[in-house]
Image (cartoon, rainbow, N blue to C red):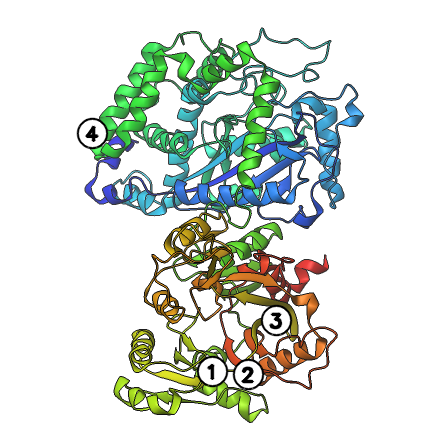
Amino acid sequence: MKFKELLQQKNARPYIMAARFGLEKESQRTTFDGQLAMTDHPTVLGNRTYHPYIQTDFSETQMELITPVANSIHEMMRYLAAIHDVAFRSMNKHEMLWPLSMPPKLPLKDEEIKIAKLEQYDGILYRRYLAREYGKRKQMVSGIHFNFEYDIELVQQLFSAQTEYKTIEEFKNILYMKVSRNYLRYRWLITYLFGASPVSEPGYFTEREERPKEPVRSLRNSAFGYKNNENVKVSYESLQHYIKDIHRMVENGILSEEKEFYSAVRLRGGKQMADLPKTGVRYIELRNLDLNPFAPLGVDEESLEFIHLFMLYLLWTDEKEAPNDWVATGDFLNEQVALGHPFAQVKLLAEGDRIFAEMDEMIESLGLFRAKKSLEVHRAQLRTPDLTIAGKMWTIIESNSNHELGIIFGKEFQGMAFERPYQLAGFRNMELSTQLFLFDIIQKGVEVEILDEPEQFLKLKHNEHIEYVKNANMTSKDNYVVPLIMENKTVTKKVLAEAGFTVPAGDEFDTLEMAEQAYVKYSEKAFVIKPKTTNYGIGITIFKEGASLADYTEALQLAFKEDSAVLIEEFLPGTEYRFFVLDDQVRAIMLRVPANVVGDGIRSVEALVAEKNLDPLRGTHHRSPLELIQLGDVERLMLKEQNLLTTSVPEKDQIVYLRENSNVSTGGDSIDVTDDFDESYKQIAIEAVQALGAKICGIDLIVPDKSIKGTKHSRTYGIIEANFNPAMHMHAYPHSGKGRHLTMDVLKMLYPEVFEK
């Protein structure tokens, strides 16, 4: 089959670079001084046996991170980054993930290497068998398994352009068998470029074992890594031969199970080998990537992009020997390269030059010009071995040690996960509440699919239980009309008033002209102007002592910018508190202090704002616990009421408020006061939310000062707003006070069965 010609067909061109990807990454948990962790797998991660993202491999310390299937390497790596963050923050804070494929120093006694403590006994029995058959020490090696599937549209187009095979299933099997053989034949190049296990630590080899002369390029990918016994022989001549050989070895007791076959390439179809004859090959699993200690995630996008290009080349290029001989030659060459010195010139320069020349030809023929840069980087490494990963490692190890290299990079990567613990790597462009929610979803092992990232729309699944969630708190538990009620402030007030709750009196206006005519009614009062359907405090202006006509008109214009109707309401004296109600319980109460600066008698308001905005907790667009303070029209109007300009210099210790409204989304400070409040106020909030028919709601109460915990209040209060999409991040990471993990509460409400296990 001439796949080269098929790939050049016009109809195949749009799908050439389309593929599906998945990744499994193993790492040992260690202490900061590079010793195997003595702790168990983190219990906060739930049931590891069924966890879709974080499991344990052979040992209790060997954590395995698994990405969902993605349609791009970039998307797959985003998930890996997020899962990495979750893993680090779920572990003991004094532990890290060892960044090297070769394990750290191992205990003298085998019994001190703990097999994974699984719930399923058959999993424990299998690991005990592996320990007897191969030894525990070889099992402690870690690496990356890269799952690769050509896009089905590409396979369909290639199939349609040929006549030799009658069914696409048969054609696909032929395609993947060819690629598998070529990968095994040319994998020496992957070992050369990405091999990253040059030396072993004490305890890996026993005194009785033969060992190579270290350093080498890749102990893991040599006969000294974790390999099947020599009597395990599987032919890649055809799918039938592959399946038959593995079945035969299981029946004869050479392999205990099908999954004990540890080739650099495994064919994957259904859930088990027995499914392959029916399903055919769906994707292939590449198992020979060492952990790259220079990459925070153990591998980087550029390396995987090159491997993607390499996989196309393996389909493009023809085999030059009979199938079994072709694979045997590859085994021999890979062993030579794996055991070569990291600085040694590879002896396969001629073949390497030919591979890169043919890849050049493929790039030109298929118009893959964006791939040239990656190709040139690795072509240069062919003649400069010190630039390969193993070469760079040996440069460091030679003057320091492998152990020290592992500690330095391990601690650095662990520290990166805690630089901004309120964000989730890979998804930092999403709203912060959604990032926190995604963290909880991944940690507890609920499958998640991002349906629409800009809209923060998620699909959750656990077993057959599916939920759809928007903005981390809009769920199926609230019916459609509930957010519509809360979005409309007029309707909200009417519903609450009819239910007997205190709400501010006021008027609604559809035009600026009509609202201006009401100036006389409000000019001498304390009042609030706000858009009818605003959220996050946008477009709100508060006048506590009346207002001039000019200021009144300007505030109206600001409100009408946000909506076609505005409300003018009486100002209720007291302090505003946000009550977060979830499933008929008050989970958090927040005092929000309006955006402000404190004068020092030297700097201007503008300079003081700039300094306060340097706080790492402050950011924009709800990606940080606090928002940057702005100096826009609303803030200038507020300053004007205090006889100040942005260039004014406040007196020392003078508090200058830049907003009347206290929303964190407009630069306010968040202070948790949940434990300070009298239970009766919490009951008011719960009953008000029930009157609105909501399960999740942020409801804002004005409470007379000093009417909180331990003080009788005769139910004096006013409800000024109900929010159907209340921000949760400000409760999780308040400016001061106790953080409240509300996103986890939402997940518990949706999936109580996950927390019952």
Kind of element beneath mark 1:
helix
- Residue 419 is left or right of residue 602, and the answer is right
Which residue position is annotated with label 3?
Answer: 582
Tell me whether circle 4 and circle 2 mark residues in contact (CB < 8 Å): no
Q: Which mark is residue 692?
A: 2
Residue 746 placement: quadrant: bottom right
- Residue 52 is left or right of residue 217, and the answer is right
N-terminal of the two: label 1 or label 2?
A: 1
Determine the CA span between mark 3 and mark 2.
13 Å
Neighbour class for label 1 at 10 Å: few (<14), some, many (≥20)? many
Q: What kind of residue is marked 2? A: Leu
Tell me the residue at 73%/41% (across/down): 122
Q: What kind of residue is marked 3? A: Leu
Q: Which mark is residue 485?
A: 1
Q: Position of residue 757 (x, y in %)?
A: 72, 56
Q: What kind of residue is marked 4? A: Glu
Tell me the residue at 54%/55% (across/down): 436
- 248 vs 555, nearest the viewer: 555
N-terminal of the two: label 4 or label 2?
A: 4
Determine the CA span between mark 4 and mark 2.
64 Å
- Residue 730 is left or right of residue 311, and the answer is right
Which residue position is annotated with label 4?
Answer: 364
Tell me whether circle 1 and circle 2 mark residues in contact (CB < 8 Å): yes
Tell me whether circle 4 and circle 3 mark residues in contact (CB < 8 Å): no
